[in-house]
Structure formats: C-alpha cells, structure tokens
Amino acid sequence: MLEEQDIRAFVYGTTRYFEVAAQQAASVGSPYLVTEGAPDIHDYNGVIAVSGRRNGIVCFSAPRGMLTVLLMKMNESNVSHEYLCDLVGEVANTIAGTVRRDLGKDFAISVPTVVAGAGNTVELPIGDRPVVIPINWRSHVAKLVVCLK
Amino acid sequence: MAANAPFLTTQLKLLIVDDSNVMRRRIERCQQIEHLQVVGLAANGVEAIELFRQTDPDVVTMDITMPEMDGIECVEQLVALNPHVLILIISALADKATAVEAMEKGANGFLNKPFSDRQLNEALAELIGGA
C-alpha cells in the first residue's frame, strides 16, 4: 500500500519530468485508489517492474496526442509509433528513477516494457489496489498508475 | 580534469549509450560542445563495448538501466579498456548510492534525467574541462 510520502515522491517525479524535459509544467490531479478491477489506460503505456524493498509496477499511461507533442517539444521530428513507444517507456523509467531519490537504492526498477494499442491491459500484482495519479499537461490528460506492496 | 586539457586543442570523439532511441537522438542533437563529434550510438552495454573498440572514443555518455549489460558494468569494462576515457553517466536513477557506485567504477560525472539542453552541455563542458 502506498503511503502519503510515497505518493508525494511520485508526484514530484512526474511534475519534474514535464518541467525539465518538456519545459512546460504539468499539473497533477487528486490521486485516487482504484477499488474495483483495473484502471482504464490510454493507448501507450510504459511499465516498470519494481522489486527490492517494494514489489509491483509503475505505469505511465498516455494518449498518442500527448506523446506526439512531447516529442515535438524535444525537437524530435520522428513521431512514429516506434518513437511514441520508446518515449512512453523512457518517461516511465525517468519518473520511477527520480522516485529513488526518496525511496533509495532498494527501490529497484526494471527496464521499461511497453503496452501499446487500444484494448490492452496492464497486468497488476494480485491482491493490491493501484493508486492513479492524474496528470494534466497542455490540453492532454495522462495518468500514472502505481501498484506496490 | 586538468590532466585532460590537451584534449581541448583536438577533435574529441563521443560515444552515446542509452537504450532509448529518443534519448540517444536527443543527446546527439542537443550537444553543442565545440570539438566534440559523435562517432557512435549504442543501445546497451554490449553494443557499447563493441563500438568502443571500433571507434576509440574520448568521451562516453552512459545510461545505467539497460538490457543485456547495464551501465555500471559497462563503465567498469570501458575503463579497463582505456583508463583515460571520460564517462558522463546520464541516468534517471536519482539516489546518491548509484552515483557513488558509478564514480567508484570509473565514471567522471553524473547527470540526472530529466535534463535540459543547457544542463547537458554544462555537464559535458565540465567533463572535458571547459568548452
């Protein structure tokens, strides 16, 4: 289960990514606990497996439009599906990596895996409920799904 | 860093190592250090060692979390091949222990992701002793 200080660390990692990499701040909505089933996800999902002191996943889930604009803000002209998949994984990796500042080296993170395409689902650890952190950037809405034991 | 001052009068070769194609291209596009020329792009530690042998770079930017071989192990192997190579770790892993471990293996600098263009160029300039 996530504690308030854990959520703060994820919020910091998320807002810092947009401030620095995209040079434009994102706002974060109220985190909420998913009480039934799995949360809805967007077309592109970067998933980081967490092990060590905590176990579970961190998933950055974003629509194509947000990722396309993010690439353009980085002066990347290639906005193909391959690059959108690469970026969504890199964002997830960067947010999870930033969280280690607070949670320490025992918060071990994997290389990202990417789940892309409508109708896909992200596999969550059994027996724990995920927390969703809504992310608003420009006119786009994404979410960070955190499910940790 | 002063020991590397002679580098500044010659062209320096840069090898970029990151498992993200977007990041490799970003570092290549954004680095604006005079005399620094990209000679290779590698997606993991194994590729990096192969390219390192082929291109003999002076400077390497190195991600840590990568498949096949991670950046920490790769740093150790690159330094064994050339103890004078300058290695800038560019990683999302923001804890101090990881930075210390990378430096102990032979890295010369550490830049956290996410980074701005200015931060990248400042880190590279500091690494090679000014630009």
Image (cartoon, helix red, strand yellow):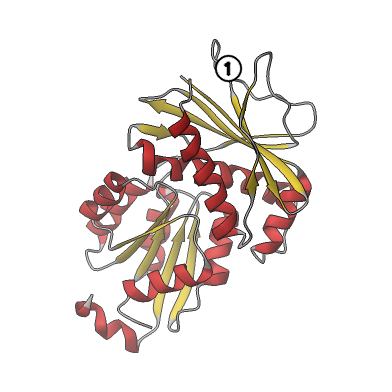
Residue A146, horizontal then vertical, whole percent: 55, 29
Residue A124, horizontal then vertical, whole percent: 59, 20
| Number of numbered callouts drawn | 1
Chain letter of mark 1 equals: A
Q: Does residue A5 appear to the left or right of A144 in the view shown?
A: left
Q: Does residue A118 appear to the left or right of A55 in the view shown?
A: right
For the question of whether residue B66 can be seen, the reply is no
- Residue B106, by quadrant, is bottom left
- Residue B24, by quadrant, is bottom right
Q: Does residue A58 appear to the left or right of B12 in the view shown?
A: right
Q: Is residue A129 above or below residue B32?
A: above
The type of residue carrying mark 1 is: Arg
Q: Is residue B121 above or below residue A9?
A: below
Q: Is residue B3 above or below residue A78?
A: below
- Residue B23, by quadrant, is bottom right
The residue at the point 45 percent across, 79 percent down is B33
Give whichever of A138, A63 is nearer the camera: A138
Residue A34, horizontal then vertical, whole percent: 65, 20
The residue at the point 62 percent across, 56 percent down is A25
Give whichever of B9, B64 is nearer the camera: B64
Packing grade of label 1 (10 A; few <14, some 14-19, many >=20) is: many
Residue B103, horizontal then vertical, whole percent: 25, 55
Give whichever of A64, A22 is nearer the camera: A22
Q: Does residue A29 appear to the left or right of A20 in the view shown?
A: right
- State the residue position of label 1: A129
